[in-house]
Amino acid sequence: MLALALAGCDEKAPSQAAAPPPPPVTVAQPVTRTVTDWDELTGRFEAIQEVEVRARVGGFIDSVEFEDGAIVHAGDLLYIIDPRPFEAVALQAQGQLDDARAKAELAKRELDRGLSLVQSSAVPEQVVDQRRQALQAAHAAETQAEGALKAAQLNVEFTHVLAPITGRVSRHLVTPGNLVQGSEGGATLLTSIVSLDPIDIYFDIDEATYQRNSKLWLEGRRPSSRDTAHPVQVTLTGETKPSHEGKMDFLDNRLDVSTATLRSRAVIPNHDLSILPGQFGRVRIIGSSPYEALLIPDAAIATDQSRKIVFVVKDDNTVEARPVTLGPLDEGLRVIREGLKAEDHVIINGLQRTRVGAKVTPQMAKAPAGDTPASDPKPLAGAKP
């Protein structure tokens, strides 16, 4: 037993396990890009033209000439009102006009005869004056008859109800056989039409945003939307990125005193007619003049309580937490307003393997297509290309 104990003392203690290498992380330098800030607001689409189609003459509906919800063009026939009573009135007015014209022709001939006879003193001047007055009265009666005929013809024309604009028609509100009232007694509503292409979107700009944009205009850094059709981007409900583009079209002349907002409008092309009046949309309008900015992927940003931070690899390959001030997203990258320099190496992948003050093995990432690194990338010690 003593021999075994002595033999055991000669054995060496096992060597400690080798320390693991620093964890690998992917780093990239911020890219530089000329960007423009956008303000995002909520808007509602409205038709540029909207018409309530009403009867202009009273009568019984003969037929409905359109399909509910169809696209109609200006001048298309929508309704036919029984025209026979109005055609009879027009025929009577035509006869009265013919009678007035005949009387005017007779009065003219009598005046001509009186003028030739008065030269030979065959008739007194008084007769000529009477015949001249009779001719004037005949012309007045002829004018009245012409007006009555035109009114009767218009009523005949109004029995064919036509679409005043191009757009999508609603359902028919009156069926054949029903009596409708004309404009004299409260015109009956027949249907409505809204234009769709292009379409307006109305939105309200808050006072702070208006003041900021107004200051840019006063400093000459941004044209006013009153004078310049600035581009507008619209994201529809359920979409994650803008799908329609348009132009600014209108700014109101005062702020709403109850909401402190300025009513604004943009015009959006709607060639596929997919947008309907009444829909909501998120409107993006230009909120700054173009400027050079540093951008990094959104995935590289972490949250520390109320602060936003990024992890930067220093020259000795240790990790440093850097507080940053964020700007908006621009084509998938986040604008960094403060906290980063062009030469910094930001960890964009492997954040879960890092610890502030610990060493890492950085690997440079490829810059996204079309992006320019803020400075020439310089590999850190031990960094892999």
Image: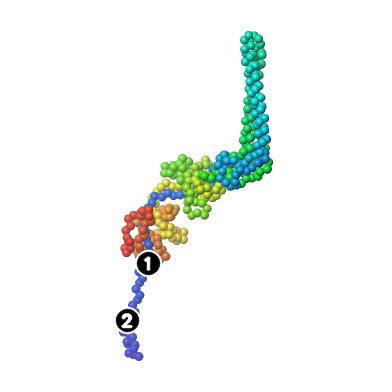
Q: Amino acid at mark 1?
A: Pro
Identify the residue at horizontal 35%, vertical 65% (top origin).
Answer: 361
Is residue 120 among the parts visible in the rendering?
yes
Q: Which mark is residue 12?
A: 2
Q: Amino acid at mark 2?
A: Lys
Q: Which mark is residue 198?
A: none
Give residue 198's position: percent from left, percent from top.
Answer: 51, 44
Give residue 219's position: percent from left, percent from top.
Answer: 42, 43
Dot 2, crowdedness within 10 Å: few (<14), some or many (≥20)? Answer: few
Identify the residue at horizontal 45%, vertical 49% (top origin).
Answer: 38
Is 308 located above or below residue 93 in the figure? below
User: What element does badge 2 sit on?
Assistant: loop
Front in this rendered view, residue 67 or 241:
67
User: What element does badge 1 sit on?
Assistant: loop
Front in this rendered view, residue 186 or 153:
153
Give residue 96's position: percent from left, percent from top.
Answer: 66, 27
Q: Tell whether 328 sits left or right of 256.
A: left
Front in this rendered view, residue 283 or 205:
283
Residue 300 lies in quadrant: bottom left
Query: Which of labels 2 and 1 is toward the front?
Result: 1
Give the mark nearer the N terminus: 2 vs 1: 2
Q: Which residue is mark 1?
A: 23
Residue 10 lies in quadrant: bottom left
Is residue 190 among the parts visible in the rendering?
no
Give residue 97's position: percent from left, percent from top.
Answer: 64, 26
Outermost residue, bottom side:
1
